Image (spheres, rainbow, N blue to C red):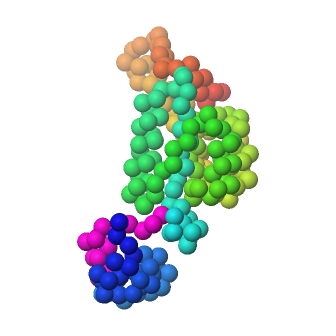
């Protein structure tokens, strides 16, 4: 494994200069910064995540809580998880996968250990038992799903009402008068029904 000292020797600078280039804490001349970045690329240097987390109080990890229970349509859940992981990587973050069944305990663990910088909670229920903990923390969180009271929370969800209306309008426009809804699991139908009321 390549060390920061080896990058410094390769670039002809001090180890502190390499550290400043990596952290951005001090202004470094453009030619020196270019030389350090070139050495990092050539040597394949990757900063030690633990050391970086200690120095910056950041882990560069996002915790993703995925539901893994019977009745869930797993391919859709995995598509979302893969999209989160792929996008996180493009922004320099890694993803820590947790199961939804861990519930509030997982939220407490993440909060208490500072293991992740932020959390994404999938499969949020109307009266989700994780929400009081999310409301108490300063750690950023995004919910996939819509609770009864989303006040002060960042939530993303499908617009079930608009999707249902567009389906019915389309089929009605084709002259159909009897329409059936076939779903993957009762939980999906229940969520759609809740969203309509």
Is residue 180 magenta-colored?
no
Residue 174: image x %, image y %?
Answer: 37, 18
Q: Residue at x 25, y 71 (%)?
A: 42
Magenta segment's dominant SS is helix
In depth, the one of 34 and 125 nearer the eye is 34
Examine the rendering and report whether any part of residue 196 can be seen: no
Image quarter in which the C terminus is found: top right
Q: Residue at x 50, y 69 (%)?
A: 52
Identity of the residue furthest to the top in this view: 178
Q: Residue at x 43, y 19 (%)?
A: 172
Q: Residue at x 54, y 23 (%)?
A: 70
Q: Quadrant of residue 131?
A: top right
In depth, the one of 143 and 170 nearer the eye is 143
Examine the rendering and report whether any part of residue 155 can be seen: yes
Residue 88: image x %, image y %?
Answer: 44, 54
Position of residue 44 in the picture relative to residue 145 (left or right) = left
Q: Which residues are magenta?
A: 34-49
Identity of the residue furthest to the left in this view: 42
Q: Is residue 34 above or below residue 86?
A: below
Residue 49: image x %, image y %?
Answer: 48, 64
Image quarter in which the N terminus is found: bottom left
């Amino acid at each position: 494994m390549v060390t920061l000292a080896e990058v410094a020797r390769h670039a002809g600078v001090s180890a502190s200069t390499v550290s400043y280039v990596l952290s951005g804490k001090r202004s470094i001349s453009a030619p020196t910064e270019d030389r350090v970045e070139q050495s990092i690329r050539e040597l394949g240097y990757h900063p030690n995540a633990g050391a970086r987390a200690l120095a910056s109080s950041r882990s560069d990890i996002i915790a993703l809580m995925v539901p893994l229970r019977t009745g869930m349509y797993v391919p859709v859940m995995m598509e979302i998880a893969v999209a989160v992981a792929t996008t996180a990587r493009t922004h320099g973050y890694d993803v820590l996968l947790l199961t939804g069944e861990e519930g509030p305990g997982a939220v407490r663990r993440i909060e208490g250990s500072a293991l992740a910088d932020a959390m994404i909670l999938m499969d949020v229920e109307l009266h989700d038992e994780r929400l009081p903990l999310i409301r108490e923390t300063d750690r950023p969180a995004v919910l996939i799903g819509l609770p009864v009271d989303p006040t002060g929370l960042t939530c993303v969800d499908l617009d079930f009402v608009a999707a249902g209306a567009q389906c019915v309008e389309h089929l009605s426009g084709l002259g159909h008068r009897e329409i059936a809804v076939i779903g993957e699991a009762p939980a999906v139908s229940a969520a759609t029904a809740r969203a309509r009321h």
